Image: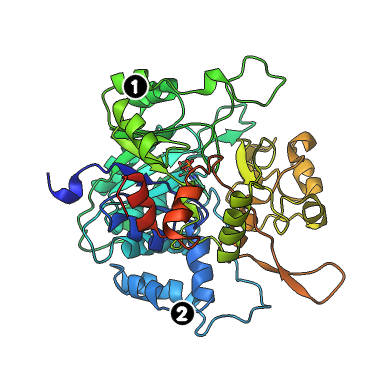
């Protein structure tokens, strides 16, 4: 086994949208641990970075390495603005993903996933993974293909049970046409709706070699792990076992009493049972310390996956002012991380930090005019005439209800697509109600619950600590 093929002790968790970008993943991978870029909505991220002028030229450099130059050029022609767009001008939207695949949207998705992985892997031999959410199905096939064209080493997927993905990775590596069955609500006639993707359609001549990345399923219980091993369409190479303190989306509580939204004993994964399955696994959710790493290794895990400690390091794409405010509040003991059972249009619990200048603040939430112009979290549903429709519980309530959606489901919903893009400085610019002034969408900040890393990190390396500092701290390296 080459050094670069060795399984890492630390996986830097994928953090969407764009929080774990290529800079963070590369900083981790060059330290011989695994850096993971977020593939969620990466097409919007790349399209917006290009509209801001791609100041350091990195995206254009990545695109110059894309194996189909005309396709990369079409993306540049569509989105690149030399010098960047004026601050008050809105970003041009990209095509919303749907059941019918639009060629320009597919091309942008392939190229964007390629570019992010390419940049994370450039100039070193460390391993790089990409993270996706099972719940977001419509961009999945072109995303996997783009990441594989850049030779991604690992695909990690959570936010659902990704049974189909291992087989799709096998198929793409053979250049086969692959199929992803789509989840369609109110599909009482059980019709089959799926996406087909033929990778050869893009490469009429010579086909480059595509390696099959390893696949890690992000799970929160031994039952799901067992299901993945038994029922997945191809081989599963390991698990990230994430508990309910982790950042981002969490699995819903497996409570016996359905009247309460709380986690309890039943939600603690049975590590012994997972160890007995014999596949490599990493533990996640509050493991960012030398003591917790040792505990994980002693339990038979290959290591840990860490999110929050990396989210606030200097290489992460979170806005610097958000990082500083969160760390400052944490040091003052004034930080509130909550599991919001309503916020996410996916229906899954979602961790948020309550901060004044975010959409989580009630006044800001009430002031925001609902809109759904990115559409990653739209649910597909079957209309009475068997046609397909799309709706998101975060869209304007009237239109959601008109589409047959249950009004109850709109309560407390946040627009995670727009909010999370704002959190990395790519928020849409909109006219304020009743004036010609423009303002950016407000951020929404997700985070893990456990900040016990913060004090020792800041004491060692200050508020502007690096990914390398996080790794050195967890590995127990002396200063
Ligand atoms: C800002 C942030 C965004 C996250 N986004 C995702 C995501 O898009 N997909 C995912 O699988 N996990 C996501 N996570 C979870 C992390 O990958 C990781 O598993 C988790 O944060 C580990 O727990 P810790 O934060 O206590 O270290 C996110 C975590 C954070 C802090």
* Among the 4 quarters of the image, the one containing residue 465: bottom left
Relative to 176, residue 115 above or below: below
Q: Quadrant of the C terminus?
A: bottom left
Location of residue 140 in the rendering, given as x and y in whole percent from the top left corner: 44, 48
Relative to 120, residue 284 above or below: above
In the foreground, 263 or 237: 263
Instruction: State left or right for residue 139 relative to residue 443.
Output: left
* Among the 4 quarters of the image, the one containing residue 468: bottom left
Instruction: State left or right for residue 200 relative to residue 2.
Output: right
Question: Can I make out residue 129 in this image?
Answer: no
Farthest right residue?
434
Farthest left residue?
1
Residue shown at 48% from the left, 40% from the top: 134
Are the two marked residues, 2 and 1, in contact with CB atoms closer than 8 angstroms? Answer: no
Location of residue 298 in the rendering, given as x and y in whole percent from the top left corner: 30, 27
Q: Which of the two discs, 2 and 1, labels the residue nearer the N terminus?
A: 2
Q: What element carries label 1?
A: helix
Residue shown at 37% from the left, 64% from the top: 115
Farthest bottom residue?
83
Relative to 306, residue 190 above or below: above
Mark nearest the camera among 2 and 1 is: 2
Residue shown at 55% from the left, 65% from the top: 320
Instruction: State left or right for residue 111 relative to residue 190.
Output: left
Q: Distance between the residues labelled 2 and 1?
A: 48 Å
* Among the 4 quarters of the image, the one containing residue 303: top left
In the foreground, 437 or 67: 437
Q: Residue 55 carries which label?
A: 2
């Amino acid at each position: 086994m080459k050094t670069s093929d060795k399984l890492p002790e630390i996986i830097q968790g994928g953090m969407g949208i764009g929080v774990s970008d290529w800079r963070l993943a590369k900083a981790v991978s060059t330290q011989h641990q695994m850096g993971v870029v977020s593939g969620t909505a990466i097409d919007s991220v790349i399209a917006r970075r290009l509209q801001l002028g791609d100041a350091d030229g990195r995206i254009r450099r990545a695109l110059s390495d894309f194996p189909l130059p005309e396709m990369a050029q079409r993306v540049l022609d569509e989105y690149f603005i030399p010098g960047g767009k004026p601050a008050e001008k809105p970003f041009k939207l990209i095509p919303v993903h749907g059941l019918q695949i639009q060629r320009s949207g597919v091309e942008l998705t392939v190229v964007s996933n390629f570019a992010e992985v390419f940049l994370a892997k450039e100039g070193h031999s460390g391993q790089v993974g990409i993270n996706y959410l099972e719940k977001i199905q419509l961009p999945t096939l072109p995303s996997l293909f783009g990441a594989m064209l850049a030779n991604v080493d690992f695909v990690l997927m959570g936010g659902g049970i990704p049974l189909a993905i291992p087989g799709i990775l096998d198929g793409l590596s053979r250049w086969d046409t692959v199929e992803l069955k789509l989840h369609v609500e109110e599909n009482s006639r059980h019709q089959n709706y799926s996406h087909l993707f033929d990778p050869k359609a893009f490469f009429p001549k010579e086909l480059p070699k595509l390696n099959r990345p390893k696949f890690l399923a992000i799970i929160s219980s031994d039952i799901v792990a067992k299901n993945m091993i038994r029922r997945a369409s191809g081989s599963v190479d390991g698990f990230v076992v994430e508990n309910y303190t982790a950042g981002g989306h969490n699995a819903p509580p497996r409570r016996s009493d359905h009247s309460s939204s709380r986690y309890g004993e039943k939600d603690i994964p049975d590590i012994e049972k997972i160890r007995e399955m014999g596949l490599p696994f990493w533990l996640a959710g509050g493991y960012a310390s030398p003591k917790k790493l040792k505990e994980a290794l002693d339990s038979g895990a290959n290591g840990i996956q860490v999110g929050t400690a990396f989210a606030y390091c200097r290489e992460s794409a979170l806005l610097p002012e958000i990082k500083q405010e969160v760390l400052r509040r944490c040091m003052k003991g004034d930080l509130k991380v909550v599991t919001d059972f309503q916020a996410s249009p996916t229906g899954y619990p979602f961790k948020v930090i309550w901060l004044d200048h975010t959409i989580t603040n009630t006044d800001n939430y009430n002031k925001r005019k609902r809109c759904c112009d990115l559409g990653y979290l739209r649910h597909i549903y079957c209309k009475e005439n068997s046609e397909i429709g799309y709706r998101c519980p975060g869209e304007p309530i009237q239109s959601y209800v008109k589409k047959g959606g249950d009004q109850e489901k709109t309560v407390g919903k946040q627009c995670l697509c727009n909010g999370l893009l704002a959190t990395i400085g790519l928020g849409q610019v909109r006219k304020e109600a009743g004036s010609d002034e423009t303002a950016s969408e407000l951020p929404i900040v997700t985070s893990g619950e456990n900040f016990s890393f913060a004090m020792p990190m800041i004491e060692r390396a200050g508020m502007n600590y690096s990914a390398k500092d996080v790794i050195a701290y967890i590995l127990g390296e002396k200063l």
